[in-house]
Image (cartoon, grey):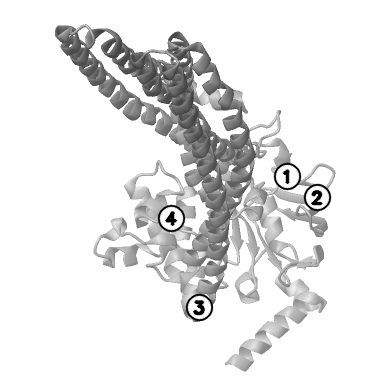
């Protein structure tokens, strides 16, 4: 883990070297004051060397001014090293998240992922900056101050040094408790973030069902857990710091007594005794800095471990011999496909389908039968295991094709349209970012949304809000269709694209979809059977299997599952009418 952490320093080696150099100078200048104090008390003042006193004072002042500049450099540029390392980690994490399969997001809440990208990486940033600096300054100060104290009085120095193991023992005892408590606090914080993300995303549902009080209760439960975790964390911290500070205070008491006895016995001069009292803090302070650094170290290491947990997740990867899908005709075949999501029972069992280029295949049947799973397997959103059948495009198994090339040739229109916060133009351009303005407009026209866009005050530059909240369901759907028009794929997947729309809007959307389907191999999932009567073939998916296949007329004449579904749906329509 240390090697992986150090790699992030490599682009900043020169700046880190300067930062460490400045830190070293700060440590050296810190030793000037006790040295000057000793000379003043033992030489300059007794011998009345007033000129030397002034020169010494001015020299210390100049050195302190230099130290101020060094501290500015360390604080500013040192923190910038940490920020840039944090930025690099955040970019790496985001890029890795983009490569992870659908299955990862099935098991991880968005709020928890956001915590790892923000709070956890901030702790890593603090460690990246303060870690090397604190270790260097403290180590140098301990060595220099110990050597200088020995030069004044070895016995007194050894007495102080003998107390250090007590301080270390107390630190180790309370540090373990503090580490566990802060780990619990971080987990509670992630739970709160997940709750906030979920509640804010679903705020409209909450208001629709007047469940604000329930959401407040759910949030309060997480918040109470966070407060409790914080209470335990800060109690552990209070024990830690009060105990270590007490040991430090004992140091001063020991020096006061031992030094006084030595002074009384004429084993040390008054000047050396005064210098020793001043200098001992130069030894104790960096020891305390190292002790306090342990908390920062634990937070940073914990954050980095959580960062690595995601970075070590296996990303989507093409087969070693994968080839690019080109010149797509659109011939699709599911051959004896069997699939089960991780940790669940089989969703598909021995499914075989064949869709010829340019044909439309419709999948119908009860919810949970496996229709959407078939749509997710075709673009390789979920990897079909070896030995569980095959899915081919133009005769080539999709496992032997690069995933990007497969997905670039597949357009998807779903019931739950996702639009990004931004303008209408930006969302249409998502289909093909390199498209021209003319191509964007043409795609909007073909999706029957261009005229509506022109009625808006800012036209194509109109902001649509988070997830397109400022648009109606039909407008969002037509915008997603325009996006697919711009992409211009050879294969099309329509996953219940109109099931959430009213009848009038459905007719308008269906016209756009019919235009979109022309010349493309299309796989349609539909609950409204009236929308797929003209499909070249209809497959009834029941319990993960293909119950029956055929055209609309053939299946009606057969009098099987499809005929019952169709009759039931139109009977309900008549009742509603």
N-term mark: 2 or 4: 2
**Callout 4: SS:** loop
Image point (73%, 71%), residue name = 365
Q: Where's residue 134, x and y in %?
A: 45, 26
Q: Residue 179's quadrant in the figure?
A: top right
Mark 1: give few (<14), some (14-19) or many (20+) Cα within 10 Å. some
Image point (34%, 55%), residue name = 423
Image point (57%, 35%), residue name = 301
The residue under label 4 is 420
Q: How far apart are marks 1 and 4 (CA)?
A: 32 Å
Q: Where's residue 310, x and y in %?
A: 61, 41
Question: On the rendered image, what quadrant is the C terminus found in?
Answer: bottom right
Q: How far apart are marks 2 and 4 (CA)?
A: 36 Å
Mark 3: give few (<14), some (14-19) or many (20+) Cα within 10 Å. few
Image point (53%, 35%), residue name = 247
The residue under label 3 is 213
The residue under label 1 is 392
Q: Can residue 128 be seen in this view?
A: no
Q: Distance between the residues labelled 2 and 3?
A: 51 Å
N-term mark: 2 or 1: 2
**Callout 1: SS:** strand
């Amino acid at each position: 883990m240390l090697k992986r952490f150090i790699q992030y320093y490599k682009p900043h080696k020169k700046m880190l070297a300067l930062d460490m150099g400045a830190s070293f100078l700060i440590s050296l200048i810190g030793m000037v004051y006790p040295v000057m104090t000793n000379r003043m008390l033992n030489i300059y003042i007794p011998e009345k060397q007033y000129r030397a006193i002034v020169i010494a004072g001015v020299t210390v002042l100049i050195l302190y001014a230099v130290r101020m500049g060094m501290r500015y450099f360390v604080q500013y540029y040192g923190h910038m090293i940490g920020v840039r390392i944090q930025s690099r980690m955040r970019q790496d994490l985001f890029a890795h998240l983009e490569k992870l399969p659908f299955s990862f997001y099935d098991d991880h809440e968005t709020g928890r992922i956001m915590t790892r990208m923000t709070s956890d990486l901030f702790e890593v940033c603090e460690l990246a900056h303060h870690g090397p600096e604190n270790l260097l300054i403290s180590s140098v100060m301990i060595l220099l101050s110990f050597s200088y104290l020995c030069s004044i009085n070895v016995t007194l120095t050894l007495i102080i040094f003998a107390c250090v193991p007590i301080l270390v023992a107390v630190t180790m005892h309370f540090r373990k408790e503090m580490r566990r408590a802060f780990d619990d606090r971080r987990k509670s914080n992630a739970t709160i973030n997940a709750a906030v993300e979920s509640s804010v995303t679903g705020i409209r549902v909450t208001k629709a069902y007047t469940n604000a009080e329930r959401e407040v209760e759910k949030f309060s439960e997480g918040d109470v857990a966070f407060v409790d975790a914080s209470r335990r964390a800060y109690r552990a911290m209070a024990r830690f710091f009060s105990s270590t500070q007490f040991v430090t205070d004992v140091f001063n008491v020991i020096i006061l007594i031992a030094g006084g006895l030595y002074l009384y016995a004429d084993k040390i001069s008054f000047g050396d005794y005064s210098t020793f009292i001043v200098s001992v803090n130069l030894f104790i302070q960096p020891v305390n800095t190292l002790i306090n650094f342990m908390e920062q170290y634990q937070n940073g290491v914990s954050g980095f471990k959580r960062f690595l947990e995601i970075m070590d997740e296996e990303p989507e990867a093409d087969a070693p011999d994968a080839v690019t899908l080109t010149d797509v005709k659109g011939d699709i075949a599911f051959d004896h496909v069997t699939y089960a999501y991780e940790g669940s029972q089989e969703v598909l069992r021995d499914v075989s389908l064949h869709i010829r280029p340019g044909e439309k295949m419709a999948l119908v049947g009860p919810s949970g039968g496996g229709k959407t799973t078939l749509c997710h397997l075709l673009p390789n959103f979920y990897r079909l295991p070896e030995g569980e059948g095959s899915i081919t495009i133009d005769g080539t198994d999709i496992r032997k094709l690069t995933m990007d090339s497969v997905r670039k040739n597949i357009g998807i229109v779903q019931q739950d349209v996702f639009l990004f916060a931004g303008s209408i133009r930006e969302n249409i351009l998502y289909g093909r970012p390199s498209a021209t303005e003319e191509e964007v407009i043409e795609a909007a026209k073909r999706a029957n949304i261009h005229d509506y866009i022109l009625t808006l005050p800012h036209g194509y530059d109109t902001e649509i809000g988070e997830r397109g909240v400022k648009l109606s369901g039909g407008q969002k759907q037509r915008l997603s269709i325009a996006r697919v028009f711009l992409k211009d794929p050879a294969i099309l997947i329509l996953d219940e694209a109109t099931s959430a729309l009213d009848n009038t809007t459905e007719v308008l959307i269906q016209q756009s979809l019919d235009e979109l389907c022309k010349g493309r191999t299309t796989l349609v999932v539909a609950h409204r059977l009236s929308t797929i009567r003209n499909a070249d073939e209809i497959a009834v998916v029941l319990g993960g299997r293909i119950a029956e296949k055929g055209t609309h007329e053939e299946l009606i004449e057969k009098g099987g599952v499809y005929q019952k579904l169709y009759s039931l749906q139109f009977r309900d329509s008549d009742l509603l009418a």
